[in-house]
Amino acid sequence: MNTLTGKRPSRRRGGDESVDRLGVAVVGLGGAVATTAVAGVELLRLGACGQDGLPLAARTDLVPYEALVFGGWDVSADDLAKAAHLHQVLEPAQIEAVAPRLQRLRPWPAIADPDYCRGVTGANVAPSGSLRERTDRVRDDLRRFRSEQELDEVVVVNLASTERQPDPAAPSLASPEAFEAALDGGDEAITPAMLYAYAALREGMAYVNFTPSVGADVPALTLLAERQGVPIAGKDGKTGQTLVKTVLAPALRSRALRVEGWYSTNLLGNRDGRALEDPGSLASKTATKESVLDAVLGYPVEDHRIRIEYYRPRGDQKEAWDNIDLVGFLGRRMQMKIDFLCRDSVLAAPLVLELVRLLAEARRRGERGVQEQFGFFFKAPMTVGGRVPEHALHRQESALLEWLDGRAPRDARP
Ligand SMILES: O=P([O-])([O-])O[C@@H]1[C@@H](O)[C@H](O)[C@@H](O)[C@H](O)[C@@H]1O
């Protein structure tokens, strides 16, 4: 601590101002993904777990995992130790090892709107008020978090339950000015996810949307991010089934094996699965899951089906089953079956940790607006000017690594 300024001294990397304490303000802090991410960092800090599942663990030029400081909002007020026990992602012994630190984390009251997310509700909600009052409240939370925790930077991450889509053509979403006016006047096209995104941007904080909800991906907020000089990335983490799809589909295309149909089923019983029982929320998720295949193959697959079933006994242990119908040489048909018995939050949490570190790096480099080079992590990567995103994982990885190594000028990325 510097006794003159009252601030901790900053480490310096390569002559640049660096980050000692990186705040992570999570929308949905009590959820399975967030509790796994927080507990994971605590276990890493204790040296009680390895780095499997963390794709950028070798990048010592990024903020270390141990520098992350968590806070955030949730509709449940349970502390994170209790939440972690409920979600049953971690072993009880893993939770016990870090319980004192998890118990100290209690979510702040959330901005919730049951009209946008019917499946998951709770009592830990901020008093309702105008849209402006709600964003003011979120901004206060962020400022308090930054000062109380003596943070150098804060990244805001959306990990909340999936919302239904708003009307994308609503005039209030078309420009920052229209959005500002709508905050004062009220507008049902403005979703809770957008309120958090707006608050982050106005506070000059980077924003990541790991959900299919519409957050910063409307013209009003992408433009605001540019103006505020803040990097943003999204959306919807590419964790299990879609990860496999975007590895396999480029290979099938390379071998000219025509995909006639691709049937993808998901069985899961976690809180996300419950949220997706609502048809509005489900439509948001299937839209991001559907978006990848035609773009990778270069032709439409009429029979690309996505099914998501909430099946409680599985909890977070998701089964993602795929059947692929292929046509090869001489018109002969073949089938391929994949059964991925995965753990939803174990796949997702490390990606969240990497994204937070990357957004901090983008901020350090003075990047602003949509960060396409982080498309590697998303099912529906945000792009500049709405161009079709790259979905093939190997090309996304190259773009990310080139950016990390400083080889790709920002406007030359795919
Ligand atoms: O990444 P992926 O396995 O294709 O997609 C998954 C969805 O099918 C699932 O419904 C959701 O709960 C997961 O968080 C993840 O988004």
Image (spheres, rainbow, N blue to C red):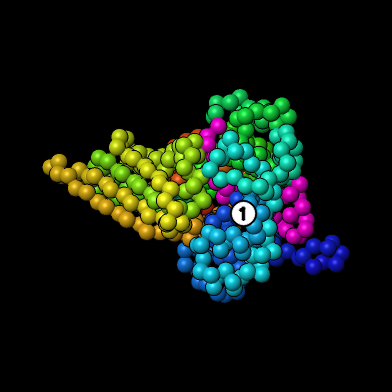
Q: Is residue 84 magenta?
A: no
The quadrant where residue 70 appears:
bottom right
**Amino acid type assigned to the residue bearing label 1 in the image:** Leu
Segment tinted magenta in the rendering: 140-166
Q: Please state which of residues 221 and 242 is positioned toward the viewer in this rendering.
A: 242
**Does residue 37 lie above or below 209 as drawn?**
below
Q: Is residue 157 magenta?
A: yes
Mark 1 Cα within 10 Å, few/some/many (few <14, many 20+)?
A: many
Q: Is residue 149 left or right of residue 276?
A: right
- For image coordinates 77% across by 58% down, the residue present is 148
- For image coordinates 61% across by 24% down, the residue present is 171
Q: Is residue 281 left or right of residue 294?
A: right
Can residue 13 be seen?
Answer: no
**Does residue 101 lie above or below 255 as drawn?**
below
Q: Is residue 323 left or right of residue 216?
A: left
Q: Please state which of residues 325 and 327 is positioned toward the viewer in this rendering.
A: 325
The quadrant where residue 262 appears:
top left
- For image coordinates 37% across by 43% down, the residue present is 307
For label 1, the SS is: loop
In the rendering, at what x and y percent does residue 82 appear?
61, 62
Residue for badge 1: 29
Q: Please state which of residues 273 and 210 is positioned toward the viewer in this rendering.
A: 273
Q: Looking at the rendering, in which quadrant would you find the N terminus?
A: bottom right
Give the residue furthest to the left. Answer: 330
- For image coordinates 24% across by 44% down, the residue present is 325
**Does residue 404 lie above or below 206 as drawn?**
below
In the rendering, at what x and y percent does residue 97 appear?
59, 73
